[in-house]
Amino acid sequence: MSIIGNLILHNTIVGDSLNLLFLSTPVGALGTGLGGGVELTLYNIAQAMQQRGHRVRVIAPSRSQLPQLDIVTVTGSLQVTAQTQGRDAAIALPPEPVLGAMWEAARRQQPHFDLVLNFAYDWLPFYLTPFFHIPVAHLVSMGSITDAMDAVILQAIARHPERIAFHTRTQAKTFGDVPETCPCLGNGIDLSLYDFCETPEDRWAWVGRIAPEKGLEDAVAAIAKTGSKLTVWGKMQFPDYWEEVRRTYPEAKVEYAGFLPTQELQRQLGRCRGFLMTPKWVEAFGNVTIEALACGVPVVAYRRGGPSEIVRDGETGFLVEPDSIEGLAEAIARWSEIDRSNCRRQAETEFSIPAMGDRVETWLRRVFSNPKSVV
Ligand code: HBI
């Protein structure tokens, strides 16, 4: 075993440390919740890489801030969110786009880094991939939404499949025939922030952006059938949608409790009897699924997208026929069949920061060691 170029640390061999340049989402500043799950994903991967001795710098829109992170912020107009676009949406950038400014900053800084890791679900980063001298890797944060994004992602895969990663196989399959060489990384959270709660209150939780693609109306309809209570947390992205749901199910015992930062959210979430996930779209992963498991909260989820690859049916929650309100109501009634310690244990073995860090570091080392771009 050669130790040249390697570092022997606490009896584990770590390879050369990498200089990593992370490009954030252009839809919102980091730390505001506007960036949705990708904020937590980026932050947790950055922590995992730094804990392993790698250097991480993040390029993000102005006003971004996250603790213990080297963030370079750039000004410019925020990008429209992809999931509000139709399948045939044109490739569009607002005037003075922050996305363009972020990638101009990356172009200038590339001589100081070994690779770029892009977290944005946008056309430009994929298109610019072969223009860079250092490898550009992408962690795709959502399933297929527009034809333009599908095409540019599949083009990048054709060129270097090992550089395009997804969270789950279900998500990858929404883009068509994606080779196994495209890794599926799951996700990871800082479990020290989540307290296991043994004895819950008679209350169910729903967490996410209050938006149609999240299917909140189904959770409220199911709760109305069971007479239980539901608390909703998350960014109020579409107030009219929320009012519509309330008007449709006036008898449901449901309350909106705002967007909480992780720390406060996990305290409230942990005390819930169960967690409902009712996505209408293919949720790439669903960070909140593993946040619930980390608190010992069983997850009742549609058998659709990421959560269907996370929840162990009958062991850490229940998987329900997609869009079946009846199915949700039946699963809600079976909450006591789940041993809450199974939920916490699954989070510890599969979704901790070290577990995610292993998967990401293995991936990035492979990207870095891979031969130069083919034209
Ligand atoms: N839309 N255009 C665009 N770009 C993103 O990076 C993006 C998005 N919509 C949602 C989103 N990112 C994040 O909420 C992901 O966590 C899903």
Image (cartoon, rainbow, N blue to C red):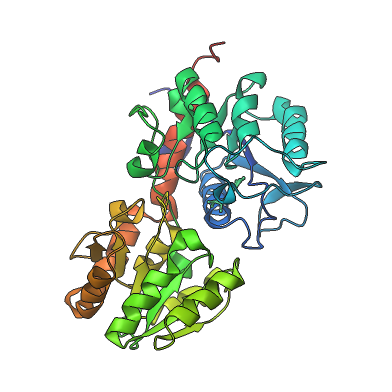
- Counting the numbered discs, the total is 0
Which residue occupies the foreground of this view, 339 or 53? 339
Q: Is residue 275 found left or right of 87 in the rendered image? A: left
Question: Where does the image place residue 343, in percent across and percent down from the top left?
Answer: 28, 67
Residue shown at the point (78%, 48%) measured from the top left = 77
Q: Is residue 186 found left or right of 38 in the rendered image? A: left
Which residue occupies the foreground of this view, 208 or 166? 208
Residue 362 vertical position relative to residue 339 in the rendered view, above or below: above
Which residue occupies the foreground of this view, 178 or 247? 247
Q: Is residue 195 visible?
A: no
Question: Where does the image place residue 34, in percent across and percent down from the top left?
Answer: 63, 59
Question: Where does the image place residue 322, in percent across and percent down from the top left?
Answer: 29, 59
Which residue occupies the foreground of this view, 173 or 363? 173
Residue shown at the point (38%, 49%) measured from the top left = 355
Residue 134 vertical position relative to residue 253 in the rendered view, above or below: above
Residue shown at the point (29%, 68%) measured from the top left = 300
Residue 168 vertical position relative to residue 317 in the rendered view, above or below: above
Q: Quadrant of the C terminus?
A: top right
